[in-house]
Image: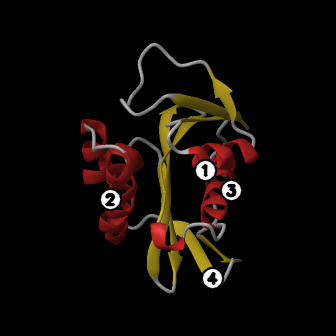
Amino acid sequence: MADSQSSRAVGVTVEIRGFRPEDAVAFRELNEAWITKYFCMEEHDHEVLGDPTRYVIGPGGQIFMAFADGVAVGCCALIRERDGVFEVGKMAVSEEIRGRGIGRQLLTYTVDQARALDAKLLTLVTSSKLPNAIHLYEALGFRHLAPPAVSPYARGDVFMELPL
């Protein structure tokens, strides 16, 4: 697995690297910003964002952070569901820097890292209120699924997967 990747988004140089303990506040704040703008924080949000090491890293997942000029501007997690299957979750890009391709870079990097972990399938849950996110997922090959009987989030009404 690559330690980090630097690339140029529109007008900004971005470094994407694995999560470090000192990234926990940025991970939480980036996610809280978009969640509270469009929805409300749910119990599972508080759990994962309050202790990402316990809920993401510990069970075998990964978190990736995107930085521009040393400032955290994005994040994305691979949350282990079972052997070979990861949920793409807690993806966020700072509102001030959206529209420059950072989300695409971050998601592409996350998918590449999932392959390096020998993942066979990526899943995700999003909302129909986030059409730009849905478009990005579709552009990278995620396909829509029928809703499961139970969703992990009240806001989740779009379910997708990407076989690797």
Which of the two discs, 4 and 3, labels the residue nearer the N terminus? Answer: 4
Crowding at dot 2, Cα within 10 Å, few <14 / some 14-19 / many 20+, comes out as many
Residue under label 1: 132
**Element type at marker 3?**
helix
Residue sitting at x 69%, y 38%:
142
Q: Position of residue 85 (x, y in %)?
A: 58, 33
Residue under label 2: 28
Residue sitting at x 62%, y 55%:
107
Q: Quadrant of the C terminus?
A: top right
**Element type at marker 4?**
strand
Residue under label 4: 13
Which of the two discs, 1 and 4, labels the residue nearer the N terminus? Answer: 4
Q: Is residue 146 above or below residue 8?
A: above
Which of the two discs, 3 and 1, labels the residue nearer the N terminus? Answer: 3
Give, as a three-letter code, the residue at label 1: Asn
Distance from Cα at disc 4 to Cα at disc 3: 16 Å
